[in-house]
Image: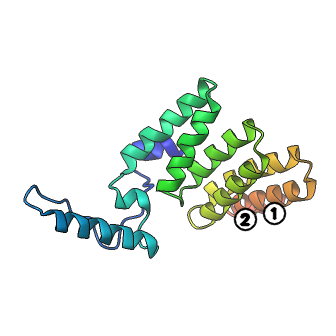
Amino acid sequence: QWVAQLKAGKLSLVRQDRKRNSPVTDAATEDALQQTLADRLARVSEGESTLGAAMGFGDEELLTMFEQGEQLMTEGKIEQAHRVFGGLIALEPRVPLFHLAAATAAELLTLKRSARRHFDDAVRCAEKLDADLLAASLLRRSRFLFVQEDFDGAREDVVRAVSLTVAEWPQAERDQA
């Protein structure tokens, strides 16, 4: 669903910089290039920009990288996919979809701590974005917690995910639920 929205241009993965990165012309001196790089990195370190935005990665490039990771997963190249998703997270750490993909790969590689961290990060990021995305992240984490025999944690995530979706139902349907 989110990939389709990205392709249609209805959703953006990249948070816009407060100060737009301007292209450097051929006439720019090396000092100007270094200053531009220093400015971009300063915005990253101050939390005003992500590394991906500072490096000029847009939705199209990130989506291409994500699809490459998915293709690697399909081909059974889980370790390589895990590295791709980790790279995406380094570029754009606030995208829940990247954390969910990394969590899935980590889970398949039996890297339980890494999987849990990525599921938790997906939920944390989704909380700031969208109720549907949050519900999906909670449900994915709940499945992981259930497999890990953390039944209380799994139940809490399911209850929270259902409460998010039920809140959007018409009142009559909520009363029946």
Tell me residue 71's x, y (percent).
54, 29
The CA span between labels 2 and 1 is: 6 Å
Please tell me whether residue 108 is drawn above or below residue 75 in the rendered image: below
Q: Quadrant of the N terminus?
A: top right
Q: Is residue 150 visible?
A: yes
Left or right of residue 125, residue 39 in this image: left
Please tell me whether residue 111 is drawn above or below residue 70 in the rendered image: below
Which mark is drawn over residue 10?
none
Question: In percent of the image, x 42 and y 60: which residue is there?
Answer: 51
Q: Nearer the viewer, residue 112 or 27?
A: 27
How dense is the environment of label 2, judged by Cα within 10 Å: few (below 14), some, or many (20 and up)? Answer: few
Disc 2 + disc 1, Cβ < 8 Å = yes
Tell me residue 165's x, y (percent).
70, 58
Q: Is residue 169 visible?
A: no
Which corner quadrant of the image does residue 70 belong to?
top right
Q: Nearer the viewer, residue 32 or 108?
A: 32
Please tell me whether residue 125 is drawn above or below residue 4 in the rendered image: below
Tell me residue 116's x, y (percent).
75, 53
Q: Residue furthest bottom?
A: 46
Q: Which residue is mark 2?
A: 171
Q: Amino acid type of disc 1?
A: Asp
Tell me residue 10's x, y (percent).
41, 51
Question: In percent of the image, x 58 and y 67: which residue is there?
Answer: 128
Which mark is drawn over residue 175?
1
Question: In percent of the image, x 57 and y 48: which residue is there?
Answer: 86
Left or right of residue 95, residue 37 in this image: left
